[in-house]
Image (spheres, rainbow, N blue to C red):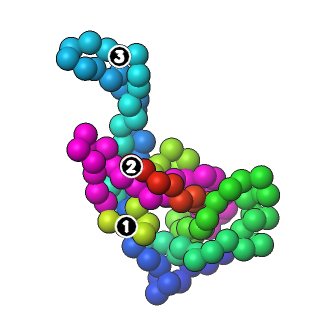
């Protein structure tokens, strides 16, 4: 599947870095917090709605809302990345990203990579 640069839209993604222990007043709580990297600006073909072709591509048991197609099969985004598609990168008071999509599934081919992404609400 070849992508056209004129159809590409800007989006941002934050790569997964690690999980760290939550510390309050010098004591570990036993909870973990996911740490993401800084938002990285990218461009890709983003579908407006899911369709039958994408459903077969990722299988019928996965819930997703849109598909991003990139013409670089080695693009570093994976299932642990979070995305800003319909919004600009922003953060809450604890400096956690308030993303609006997550990557549900990745399908790589020789010339391109497709990402099934799902809408989420992060408060």
Residue 99: % across, % down: 40, 55
Label 2 vs 3, first from the N-terminus: 3
Closest to the camera, between mark 2 and mark 3, is 2
Residue situated in front as seen by the camera: 78 or 48:
48
Residue of label 1:
87
Query: For the residue labelled by badge 3, is the local secondary structure a helix, a strand or a loop?
Result: strand
Image: magenta residue range:
89-114
Residue 66 in picture, x, y percent from top left: 59, 67
Number of other residues with Cα within 10 Å of mark 2, as a class: few under 14, some 14 to 19, many 20 or more: few
Measured as percent of width and height from the top left, residue 4 is found at 53, 83
For marks 1 and 3, the one nearer the N-term is 3
Taking the spot 31% from the left edge, 14% from the top edge, the residue there is 28
Asked if the magenta segment contains residue 104, the reply would be: yes
Q: Which residue is mark 3?
A: 29
- Label 1 element class: loop
- Quarter where residue 43 is shown: bottom left
Is 105 within the magenta? yes
Report crowding for label 1: few under 14, some 14 to 19, many 20 or more residues within 10 A (C-alpha). few
Location of residue 95 (image quadrant): top left
Of badges 2 and 1, the one in the foreground is 2
The circle on residue 123 is 2
Element type at mark 2: loop
Q: Residues within 10 Å of mark 3 (few under 14, many from 20)?
A: few
Residue ranking furthest to the bottom: 6
The N terminus, quarter of image: bottom right
Residue in the image at 77% along x and 52% along y: 61
Residue appearing at x 33%, y 23% in the figure: 22
> How far apart are the alpha carbons under marks 1 and 3?
32 Å
């Amino acid at each position: 599947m070849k992508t056209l640069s004129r159809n590409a839209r800007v989006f941002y993604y934050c790569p997964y870095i690690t999980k760290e222990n939550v510390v309050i007043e010098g004591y570990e709580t036993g909870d973990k917090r996911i740490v993401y990297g800084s938002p990285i600006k990218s461009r890709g073909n983003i579908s407006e709605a899911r369709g039958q072709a994408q459903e077969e591509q990722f299988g019928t048991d996965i819930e997703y809302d849109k598909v991003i197609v990139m013409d670089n099969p080695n693009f570093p985004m994976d299932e642990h990345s979070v995305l800003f598609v319909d919004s600009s990168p922003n953060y809450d008071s604890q400096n956690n990203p308030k993303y609006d999509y997550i990557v549900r599934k990745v399908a790589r081919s020789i010339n391109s990579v497709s990402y099934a992404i799902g809408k989420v609400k992060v408060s």
